[in-house]
Amino acid sequence: MSKTVSKLSVELKNAPRDASLVSGYVNKSLNREETLSVSCIVLADNLGEENQPLKRERQDSRVPVYTYVLNMRGQPLMPTTPQKARKLVKEKKAKVIRRIPFTIQLNYPTGENKQKTKLGNDPGYENGGISIITDEKELFVAELSLRMEVSKKLDKRRMYRQNRRSRLWYRPPRFDYRKKSKPTGWLAPSIRNKLDTQIRLIDFTRTILPITEIIAEIASFDIQKMQKPNIQGIEYQRGTLFGYTVRNYLLEKWGHKCAYCGKTNIPLEIDHIIPISKIPNNRIDNLTIACRPCNLKKGNKLTDECNPKLRKRILEIQKKATKSYKGATFMNIVRWKLIEQLDCQYTYGDRTKYQRTKLGLKKSHVNDAFVIAGGTTQTFSKVYEVKQIRRNNRSLQLNRKGFKPSIRKQRYPYQRNDLVKYNNGLYRVKGTHCKGTRVILYPPNQKKKIKSVSIKKIELKTYGKGLSFN
Ligand SMILES: [Zn+2]
């Protein structure tokens, strides 16, 4: 037993650094084969991703903050420092356009000095990241929180609506709200919202920075490339990234467990379903993940030579292996649509992960976006927290007698999340009451509520609806 363990630890040295995170390794004999070569990269350590020595971290206190600059026609120029911006505003050479992120517009004509600016986008389900870099600096970076309550809200609306309509004596039949009759390319509202929010943020950054290139992550694995390994790319040709991709792909496809016995948290090996010693086949659909005992038990027997129980299992595995694994289908829809709408370049998640671990960066959406944009040694900048705030406060509510939902249609002067000035301090509005004549305020970045204030005592600084920056 101890002999096997020591053998494992030796072999793990050849695996990519974050390999132990998924508790498995590529059998060394497999590595020698051309298509599954991981052996050509030797890394110093093989710690899990959480235990990685981080080479760089984003420190919020010291990182630079930029002021975004627009020319007289409102087109974006390269950003400047807050000190210079303050001077320009003081000398009346510029006016303030937006507070967060701080943006000014020049009052005098200037030449255009634009650099190559790349935007990296890492779309996600709950959060997303976006990073804009030049060759030396990161100019803008934001972590986007997406709305998670959309479908719940729609369920509630449906409940009230069905209830209300069922009370009618007669209502002509309607069909056009059914999913079947939706136009092609229709997305569920919760997904549509996530997609639109990401596009809205990218469109916003285009108004403050002259972006020349956009790159987004499209999927976790490049399945096409795995099936035809010798297409292009240095890392693919050398086989490092390719072996890494195959390994991660198989682990994900088979759920990080042995395909034969279903055990988890044990070293896993790549197993050829039809042994290569019998029929040489290194295609992805002939590979699976197995633990050592299962792999040994199967040996290099052909399916027909196995006992009936094992043969049945092998046939099941074979069936599953030939199906292509698409990962989380939801994210795939959003990502493809995103690329389609932005008409931009794309990259794959495994490449991002590989590059990020190589740079020694922590796993986060902003760091992924930074890597996707092609970032290496650029200086970081302050991370903005971006949130999509509901624009409408139209809500269904029970009336005072406790039934018949009424719809509040009136807009009050102050809405949730508006930034206001009160007693020489900045506050955000938590909510309104007394028919919009009073608001409840809280200091930004703190959840502590303060007492309700009359709207006569406050002054509006920025509306909080839509994309809200912090
Ligand atoms: Zn097993």
Image (cartoon, rainbow, N blue to C red):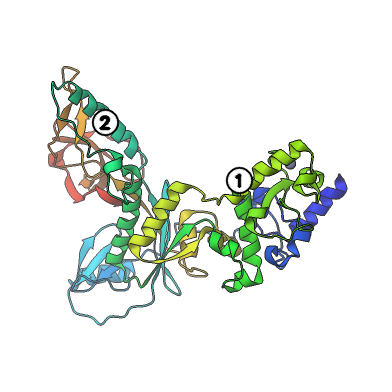
376, 220: nearer the viewer: 220
**What residue is pinned by disc 1?**
320
Rendered position, 91 above or below 147: below
Percent of width and height locating residue 92: 17, 71
Rendered position, 281 above or below 450: below
Q: Where in the image, quadrant-wise, is ligand 1 located?
A: top right
Callout 1 environment at 10 Å: few (<14), some (14 to 19), or many (20+)? some
Q: State which quadrant residue 227 falls in.
A: bottom right
- Label 2 vs label 1: CA separation? 39 Å
Residue at point 42%, 46% (across, down):
126
285, 52: nearer the viewer: 285
Residue at point 80%, 45% (across, down):
305
- Hey, what amino acid is under mark 1? Lys
**What residue is pinned by disc 2?**
158
406, 242: nearer the viewer: 242
Residue at point 76%, 54% (across, down):
275
Res. 394 visible in picture: yes
> Would residue 52 be found to the left or right of residue 10 on screen?
left
